[in-house]
Amino acid sequence: MAIPDSTYAKASPTDIFSHIKTHEKIKMVNCSSSLACPHNLTEEKMERGLENHGNLELIFMVVLAVMMALVMFSLGCTVDIKKLWLHIRRPWGIAVGLLCQYGLMPFIAYLLATSFSLPPIQAIAVLILGCSPGGTISNIFTYWVDGDMDLSICMTTCSTVVALGMMPLCLYLYTQSWDFEQNLTVPYQTIGITLLCLIVPVAFGIFVNFKWRKQSKIILRLGAVVGVVLLLVVTVAGVVLAKGSLNSSISLLVISFVFPLIGHIVGFLLALLTRHSWERCRTISLETGAQNIQMCSTMLQLSFSSEHVAQIFSFPLSYGFFQLLDGLLIISVYQVYKRLFKRRNEEKNLNCNEVSELTESDAKHETTSFLERNDPIAAMTIDLSEAVLSSSKL
């Protein structure tokens, strides 16, 4: 709305100022109805981010469910019923794993949140992840490092069952020192679905291993490879989809990088102190550092508003990405060590065989020379027997 210059010339400064204010109000009203307005643009971005967040949730639910069923079926083909029953009757390894899962991991999460001085909502996200049970990814890692698969599956199952009571208990104990009034909702439905996706495929895998031994080995190899590929696809897709819609602070990024490493190291040391075998130490270490990302994400969505979820949902995704990298690094180091150790053993066996052959030939030579000096007929008999043996070999 323009004013002629003659009007400006006749108007007083007060009238000009009031007209400018009225003109700005009209512009603000028009801007409120336009998508070009910066304020509306941020709202549009927020709505788009929340929409991407919903798509991300759906993708993760479907892909992780398929991955869990396939991988657990294939890994169930490695389970021996006798060893599984032995772990249940003497649950010393399971007890150490649960102590790491619900004793050390929540405590480490609390220390990290307080040491980085995180805001309450971010601190709660870190603590929820620390109180989550072990994830299926640990079973894949255990297979590739020649760990105790029976113990790994028992630990994953037991930690998921115990999560029904230990998750709310740990969250209640550690949030008492924080000024936090938000009610947290434990995803009991997700825990039940996780148990079904874990127990049913493993039971089918055990049955296949019991009935068809040769076919179970083929299924195991295919399932392990497909599981790793699916984990890579889920991680890359999660990072790409979350890049434009979710915000993450540097502190949360550092914690998501450090947290799984600390879990692996502490779990290995505790298993070593309790005098477990190297095979079980590797298993407990991987089970401790690998958390159930899907359960943590579901609990965040049930407990917080959409605005808060958009701020902290990237933390479990980044944790899952870094725990995958840590697991691949551990597998690579172990496979290299395994090959070097195998070569050393082969070289030692060759040296031992050469030494034993030389010792035998020296002993025969000394025996022959002794008999030649004392009993020529016996020496001739030994020479003839050796000649017959060499001719038979030819």
Image (spheres, helix red, strand yellow):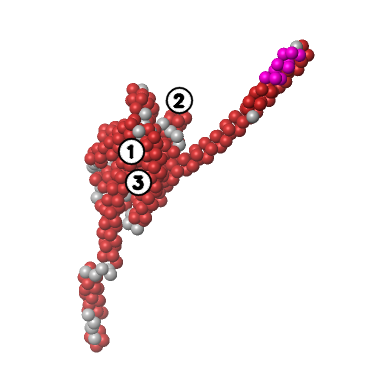
Magenta stretch: includes residue 87: no
Q: Quadrant of residue 365?
A: top right
Helix, strand or loop at label 1? It is helix
The circle drawn on residue 73 is 1
Question: Residue 51: x and y, percent?
Answer: 26, 57
Please tell me whether mark 1 or mark 2 is closer to you in this view.
1
Using the rendered image of the protein, determine whether residue 255 is visible from the camera's viewpoint.
no
Q: Quadrant of the N terminus?
A: bottom left
In the picture, residue 155 is in which quadrant?
top left
Q: CA distance from mark 3 to mark 1?
A: 26 Å
Q: Where is residue 387? Give x, y as percent.
A: 69, 23
> Quick check: 120 left or right of 272?
left
* Mark closest to the chain's N terminus, 1 or 2: 1
- Is the C-beta separation of discs 3 and 1 under 8 Å? no
**Pointer 2 local density, CA inside 10 Å: few below 14, some 14–19, many at least 20:** few
Predominant SS along the magenta part: helix
Residue at 43 percent across and 42 percent down: it is 327
Residue 381 among those drawn in magenta: yes
Q: Look at label 1 and name its amino acid.
A: Phe
Marks 1 and 2 sit apart, C-alpha to C-alpha, by 31 Å
The amino acid pointed to by label 2 is: Arg
Mark seen at residue 316: 3
Earlier along the polypeptide chain: callout 3 or callout 1? 1
Write the start and end of the magenta stretch as one range.
Answer: 376-385
Q: How many marks?
A: 3
Please state the horizontal and vertical placement of residue 303, each as a whole percent of the image: 25, 45
Q: Which one is closest to the eye, mark 3 or mark 2?
A: 2
Closer to the camera in the image, 123 or 19: 123
Q: Which residue is mark 2?
A: 275
Q: Quadrant of the C terminus?
A: top right
